[in-house]
Image (cartoon, rainbow, N blue to C red):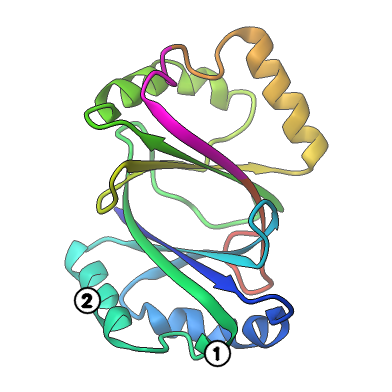
C-alpha cells in the first residue's frame, strides 16, 4: 500500500468556494485511488487542506500524479489557491493500512525531516516501542516519503479532544516510551499541525 499526500494552500478569505467544490473535485482528481481523508488544518498552517489517497498499485498512483501534473487546474479551484503540494509515501514496516472511520475528530499530523541515511535507525527505534505507545492511543499511520529530500516522515494520531491529546502524550512521556528512545537522533526538523475532517471525508 502506498499513499499520496496532497496539500492545498488556500488564499486568505477564499475557503468558502474551495470547500464547496472539494466533495466532487477531490475524488475526480484521483480516479485510480481510494480517498482516505480530506482534512482542514485547524491549528498550525491555516487555510490548508490535506488529502490522503491510498493506492494498491504504484502504477495507478503514477498515472493519477501524471494527470494532475499535466492539468493546470486539477481541482477546478486554482483561482483560490496559492499552492498545491504532492508527495508519495510508504508506510513503515510495522504499520498496517489506514482503515477509514470515526477515529477523530482531531488529527495531529507530525512531519519530521530525516537526515540522509537516517531512516533505518529511526524506523528501528520506533518499532521497538510503538506497540507500547499504541496501548495509550492509536497511531493511525507513520510513513516515509519516496520522492522528497530530505525524507519526510509523517505520522497521524487521532484524538477525541485536545485535552485527551495532552493527557496521553504526557502519560507516554512519563512512562519513558515516547518520544522513542533514539528516535530523534536523525531528525532535522519537525512540525505539528491539528487537522479536522471535512464533511465528506472517510476519516471522521
Q: Position of residue 78 (x, y in %)?
A: 50, 86
Q: Which residue is mark 2?
A: 63
- Quarter holding residue 161: top right
- Asked if residue 104 can be seen in this view, the reply is no
Q: Is residue 190 magenta?
A: yes
Bounds of the magenta span?
182-192
Of residues 93 and 123, the one nearer the viewer is: 123
For label 2, the SS is helix
Q: Position of residue 197 (x, y in %)?
A: 66, 62
Residue 33 visible in this rendered orientation of the protein: yes
- CA distance for labels 1 and 2: 25 Å
Q: Is residue 164 left or right of residue 199?
A: right
Establish if 107 lies above or below 168.
Answer: below
**Quadrant showing the C terminus:** bottom right
The structure residue drawn at horizontal position 21% and vertical position 70%, both measured from the top left corner, is 62
Packing grade of label 1 (10 A; few <14, some 14-19, many >=20) is few
Q: Is residue 140 magenta?
A: no
**Residue 107 x, y percent position in the rendering:** 64, 48
Amino acid at each position: 500500500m502506498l499513499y499520496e499526500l496532497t496539500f492545498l494552500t488556500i488564499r486568505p478569505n477564499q475557503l468558502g468556494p474551495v470547500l464547496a467544490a472539494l466533495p466532487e473535485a477531490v475524488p475526480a482528481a484521483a480516479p485510480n485511488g481510494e480517498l482516505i481523508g480530506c482534512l482542514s488544518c485547524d491549528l498550525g498552517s491555516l487555510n490548508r487542506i490535506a488529502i490522503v489517497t491510498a493506492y494498491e498499485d504504484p502504477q495507478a498512483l503514477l498515472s493519477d500524479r501524471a494527470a494532475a501534473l499535466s492539468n493546470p487546474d486539477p481541482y477546478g479551484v486554482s483561482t483560490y489557491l496559492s499552492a498545491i503540494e504532492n508527495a508519495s509515501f510508504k508506510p513503515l514496516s510495522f504499520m498496517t493500512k489506514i482503515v477509514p472511520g470515526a477515529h477523530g475528530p482531531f488529527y495531529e499530523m507530525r512531519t519530521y525531516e530525516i537526515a540522509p541515511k537516517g531512516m533505518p535507525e529511526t524506523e528501528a527505534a520506533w518499532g521497538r516501542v510503538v506497540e507500547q505507545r499504541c496501548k495509550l492511543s492509536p497511531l493511525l499511520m507513520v510513513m516515509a516519503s519516496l520522492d522528497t529530500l530530505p525524507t519526510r516522515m509523517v505520522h497521524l494520531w487521532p484524538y477525541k479532544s485536545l485535552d485527551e491529546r495532552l493527557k496521553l502524550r504526557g502519560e507516554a512521556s512519563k512512562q519513558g516510551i515516547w518520544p522513542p528512545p533514539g528516535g530523534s537522533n536523525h531528525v532535522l526538523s519537525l512540525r505539528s499541525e491539528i487537522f479536522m475532517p471535512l464533511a465528506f471525508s472517510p476519516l471522521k
